[in-house]
Amino acid sequence: MATESNLVGMRASHRALDADLTDCSAPQLVVVRHGESEWNKLNLFTGWKDPALTDKGKEEALKGAKELKKYGYDHYDIAFTSALQRAQTTLKIILKEIDAESLETIKDQALNERDYGDLTGLNKDDARKKWGEEQVHVWRRSFDVPPPNGESLELTAKRVLPYWEKEIKPRVLKGERVLIAAHGNSLRSLAMELEGLTGEEVVKMELATGVPIVYKLDKTGKVLEKKILE
Ligand SMILES: O=C(O)[C@@H](CO)OP(=O)(O)O
């Protein structure tokens, strides 16, 4: 079922929000985190490594596509994805299901998952045993503390957001229907900008695999409405 939420901390007043929600021409953006990957299943830090989707991950992508169809979000002008196959395959499965296999798709490593540095490939439970629960939590969910030789969420945002500003946002604001298939932390970076969240708020946000999020934006690119299609 689609859940609709007007965002906490949203800058617009309710009056302005109501007015804008009746405006069907308000720019819209759909983002989706890839389905479960082989390394998600094995509980390994993944980052820029490139494992494939599991069967469950493919089913999650298909389910996400069916939700998009059900709610009428099945026409797009362009899609963006990362340079990693788990996001690309998720997108492919979605485009097949909505009969849009030939949609123009731009792949860019700016949308990749955060680089987990030296943690890449380690089991998350083993890492907790080695460095302690708290340290691993800080590496995974603090805003500005990078894992050794890797990227913090802040550093991830520093390459995701310029790409958003330059390549994606102008299209969305022009009225193009844009679909982005990417990763937990590249999409957290984007959510931070769109939803006006602080670093502290955004690290608490968990994105489910294969679940599309539909954003309706105002003319400056800030979120008026967010629907999670789960
Ligand atoms: O391992 C990773 O690359 C990411 C996403 O699966 O993990 P985390 O939940 O720690 O951000």
Image (tube, rainbow, N blue to C red):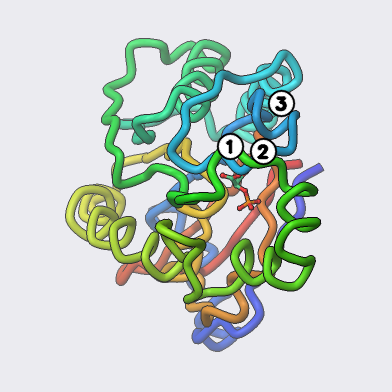
| Residue 121: assigned label | 1
Task: Work out whether residue 178 or residue 51 is closer to the camera in this orientation and state it.
Answer: 51
Question: With 77 as the anchor, is 6 left or right in this view?
Answer: right
Outermost residue toward the left in this view:
166
Quadrant where the N terminus sits is top right
Quadrant where the C terminus sits is top right
Question: Under tag 3, what secondary structure?
Answer: helix
Task: Work out whether residue 79 or residue 119 is closer to the camera in this orientation and state it.
Answer: 119
Callout 1: 10 Å neighbours few (<14), some, many (20+)? some
Say whether disc 1 or disc 3 marks the residue closer to the N-terminus: 3
Say whether disc 2 or disc 3 marks the residue closer to the N-terminus: 2
Q: Do the numbered discs 2 and 3 sit on residues whose CB atoms are within 8 Å? A: no
Location of residue 136 by image quarter: bottom right
Q: Residue 139 at x, y = what percent?
A: 59, 65
Q: Do the numbered discs 1 and 2 sit on residues whose CB atoms are within 8 Å? A: yes
Please, is residue 40 above or below residue 204 in the view? above
Q: For mark 2, what is the residue?
A: 44
Question: With 46 as the anchor, is 220 left or right in this view?
Answer: left
| Residue 60: assigned label | 3
The answer to whether residue 52 shows anywhere in this view is: yes
Please, is residue 22 above or below residue 214 in the view? below
Please, is residue 206 above or below residue 35 in the view? below
Task: Work out whether residue 22 or residue 140 is closer to the camera in this orientation and state it.
Answer: 140
Q: Say what amino acid the circle numbered 2 marks.
A: Leu
Q: Residue 32 at x, y = what percent?
A: 55, 40
Question: Under tag 2, what secondary structure?
Answer: loop
Q: Residue at x 47, y 32 (%)?
A: 49
Give the alpha-carbon distance from disc 2 to disc 3, as whole Å.
Answer: 19 Å
Mark 2 and ligand 1: say if the CB distance to the nearest ligand atom is below 8 Å. yes
Q: Residue at x 21, y 55 (%)?
A: 170
Q: Residue 11 at x, y = what percent?
A: 50, 86
